[in-house]
Image (cartoon, rainbow, N blue to C red):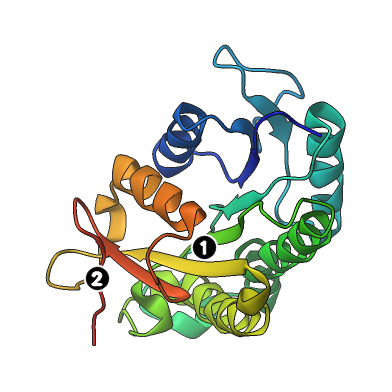
């Protein structure tokens, strides 16, 4: 077994993914990051870098296998941070997005994280009962609000679908100590953050979620420097 807990971050971009990785590393976690540019080696910071294609859900189990091989333990924390969308060919017509693009983006936004949650659950069953187990999905406001822009079609479909299964998973497994969170950063007034997401705020909040300290619900809306904030 690994001497330290392990976190696997799926979708390790330069803002949220990088900040989450650095925060967990500072908290004593072994860190694995998976992205399209993964190398299969350790980074200068000591993170295991894995190459991933989130359009292919059947490739997800191999990432968990690689983590267990490297650290001799399953990840107790899994963060799904990958996301994608396809701009409509006709920018004013939401239904001009092809069905093929809808399906491909759904793999990234919903199916691959679902497979990751399945793999996380299997791994958690091999860890000690005292170990806190956490799955965190980087969401946004689109599961509760229709942002009226055709550009967001596939992203909104995926976020909404994932919010449902994450909420259901948390209701089903939280009594066993397995927590599932749909994390959504908001402005202080509850409005959509869009591209103004704060990487460091995600790192801080995700680390709090992994501690299972506060009684945060699965729909984990948060504000920078405040943590969990419930919005009606």
Residue drawn at 54 percent across, 16 percent down:
45
Tags 1 and 2 in contact by the CB under 8 Å rule? no
Among the 4 quarters of the image, the one containing residue 209: bottom left
Q: Which residue is mark 2?
A: 229
Give how far across and how far down residue 81 sits, in percent. 53, 52
Give how far across and how far down residue 166 sits, in percent. 59, 76
105 horizontally vs 188: left or right: right
Residue 89 appears in the figure: no
Label 1 to label 2, Cα distance in Å?
Answer: 27 Å
Among the 4 quarters of the image, the one containing residue 129: bottom right
Q: Is residue 163 above or below residue 89?
A: below
Residue drawn at 43 percent across, 81 percent down:
143
Q: Check the picture and name the quadrant holding the C terminus.
A: bottom left
Give how far across and how far down residue 21 sits, in percent. 50, 35
Q: Earlier in the sequence, mark 1 or mark 2?
A: 1
Looking at the rendered structure, which numbered label has been put on residue 119?
none
- Classify mark 2: helix, strand or loop: loop
Q: Residues within 10 Å of mark 2 (few under 14, many from 20)?
A: some
Among the 4 quarters of the image, the one containing residue 169: bottom right
Q: Which residue is mark 1?
A: 85
87, 217: nearer the viewer: 217
Residue furthest to the front in view is: 130
């Amino acid at each position: 077994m690994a001497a330290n807990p392990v976190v696997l971050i799926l979708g390790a971009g330069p803002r949220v993914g990088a900040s989450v990785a650095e925060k967990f590393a500072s908290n004593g976690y072994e860190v694995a990051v998976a992205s399209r540019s993964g190398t299969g080696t350790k980074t200068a910071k000591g993170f295991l870098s894995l190459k991933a294609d989130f359009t292919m859900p059947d490739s997800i189990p191999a990432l968990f296998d690689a983590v267990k091989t490297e650290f001799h333990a399953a990840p107790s924390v899994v963060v799904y941070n990958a996301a994608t969308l396809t701009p409509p060919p006709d920018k004013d017509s939401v239904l001009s997005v092809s069905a093929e693009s809808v399906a491909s983006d759904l793999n990234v936004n919903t199916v691959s994280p679902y497979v990751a949650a399945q793999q996380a659950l299997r791994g958690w069953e091999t860890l000690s009962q005292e170990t806190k187990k956490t799955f965190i999905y980087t969401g946004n406001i689109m599961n509760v609000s229709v942002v009226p822009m055709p550009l967001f079609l596939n992203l909104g479909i995926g976020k909404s679908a994932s919010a449902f299964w994450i909420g259901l998973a948390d209701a089903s497994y939280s009594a066993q100590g397995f927590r599932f969170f749909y994390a959504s950063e908001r402005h202080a007034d509850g409005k959509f953050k869009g591209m103004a997401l704060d990487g460091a705020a995600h790192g801080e909040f995700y680390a709090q979620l992994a501690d299972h300290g506060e009684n945060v619900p699965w729909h984990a809306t948060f504000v920078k420097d405040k943590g969990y904030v419930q919005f009606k």
